[in-house]
Image (spheres, helix red, strand yellow):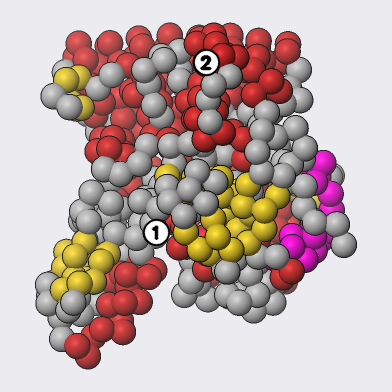
Amino acid sequence: MKWPAWEDVAFYMQEPEVMYASIAAERRAAPVYWYTPPKFATGLWVLSKWEHQRFVGSHPELFSSRYGFALGDASDPVTVMRQLPDWAQRALREGNLSPAETRWMIARGKLSLGDPEFVALILLDPPRHGHVRSIMMKALRPSLVRSLKARIAEITDELLDRIEPGAELDFVTTVGRIPAALMTELVGVPRDMRDRFIEMASAQMAAITIDPNRDPAEVQRIERLTKTFHGYCDELLAERRASGGGEDDLVSIIARSEFEGAPVPRSMAISFIHTFVNAGETTRALLSFVAMALAERPDQRRLLVERPELVANAIEETLRTHPLNWSGCRTATQDVEIGGQLIRKDDYVMMAYASANRDEDVWDRPDEYDVTRSFDKDHQSFGHGEHSCPGALLARTDSAMIFERLLARFPDWELAGIPQRWANPFLQGLGALPLRFRV
Amino acid sequence: MKVIVDELRCDAHGQCMRACPEVFRLDDDDDVVTVLVKEPDESLRESVRRAARVCPKAAIRIED
């Protein structure tokens, strides 16, 4: 059995059973494993067990987010150089950076939004992380999210009204669009700009993934769209600052918030908008996997039609079996032992979420999709601890609402073609999901 | 035993309330969990520990 090539797109494009068998083989034989991917600057520790990943997530003081959060951040700088801004390229070329500082430069460079001083939320440690995050969380307050239920139902019904029973449709670009539409409202984008905004947003997903094999023309296209997108964010913010920002949308909240006694800096504001926008896209991926899993398993779908109270659980089971992030990384701040291995200060540590979610010490029949499964222990798909997904409640709320209504209207659906998976070693999603719905 | 919640971290997921409703309370319009009993009885130790363990933000600490 070949062990996972975690950095390699081809690894994730295999048949899922083959891929998960390989992941399980590594988890059983070497749950804490030092792996050096080809073309990488240094190796990294692969943590495959749920328990070990929970430990890392609960201890941000031992495992810092500063020196990279994605596997690709440990790439050999030469291979990713052209995707980074000039100042980061210069720092990397001078070549006197330690491996951890090299990752920091790559991660910071790709998320800099054109501002060399800016540090994205995902690269911050406590206490600063909590202060920055709390500004954004005002627009994701649980009370606010819960109050959206009626609006989510309304958007969903409008869309379901247009579905023709028996006709083939692409789920990803129809029902899958609901979270992105909802996000434009939460961000505060005026109605006439929403479609354009979603289009810019979809291209954004690529920008956060460092990919050594990316075509230069594609790099340029992403850069162009990013510029347009940022220009639009500036306009929106300026307009909301001028009007006093009295609403509950993200841009209004940013417009009236302060950070360290001054207005929220531009890059921070744009990064919050990015986060919301990306969340629309990851939720689209989640919905697509739920629809696919239920198309492939009519027995499970029928169970949900009979017992709609299980829909929320089906969302969790889909998250467990189809994590949107394949993995997440941290850097050890001091020597620490995990599973009998000594992890040295500055070592890069990768939490393989796809593995923890099928850890046999936590889950019975881990490879089986079972909507009645109990979730006493949470899966790792939203991460755990300081950096756990800020939009988890929103994603859970809108996906449960959408599938409750979908199942009530169209209790039966089937695949009308082959689902198309994203080719991405960091994120999992579907590019197309042809389905046929029946009443 | 003392229960401490890091309010900056709490995202009001409500998992702690399901694990230990005697100590944690979260209503639909709350944005931060309320600790009903700051120094709960020893008999609740196991369920308070479970609440700390299930918190997605690792925002709950127990001090002796």
A381 relative position to B51: left or right: right
From the viewer's perspective, is residue A106 above or below residue A406? above
Identified at 43% across, 9% down, the residue is A231
Q: From this viewpoint, is residue A346 visible?
A: yes
Q: Chain of mark 1?
A: A
Number of the front mark, 2 or 1: 2
Q: Which residues are magenta?
A: A10-27
Q: What element does badge 2 sit on?
A: helix
At 36% from the left and 64% from the top, the residue drawn is B55
Please give the chain letter of the residue carrying mark 2. A
Does residue A186 belong to the magenta stretch? Answer: no
Kindly identify the amino acid type of the residue bearing the numbered disc 1: Ser
How far from the left and from the top, in percent, is residue A233? 39, 15
Q: Which residue is mark 2?
A: A91
Helix or strand or loop: what does disc 1 sit on? helix
Residue located farthest toward the bottom when viewing the structure as drawn:
B43
Work out whether residue A97 or residue A264 is closer to the camera in this orientation and state it.
Answer: A97
In the rendered image, the quadrant that contains the C terminus of chain A is bottom right
Q: Residue furthest right?
A: A1
Image coordinates of residue A345 in percent, x first then y, are 48, 48
Mark toward the start of the polypeptide (2 vs 1): 1
Marks 2 and 1: same chain?
yes
Q: Which residue matches tag 1? A: A58
Amino acid beneath label 2: Ala
Residue A80 sits in quarter: top right
Residue under the point 23% across and 85% down: B44
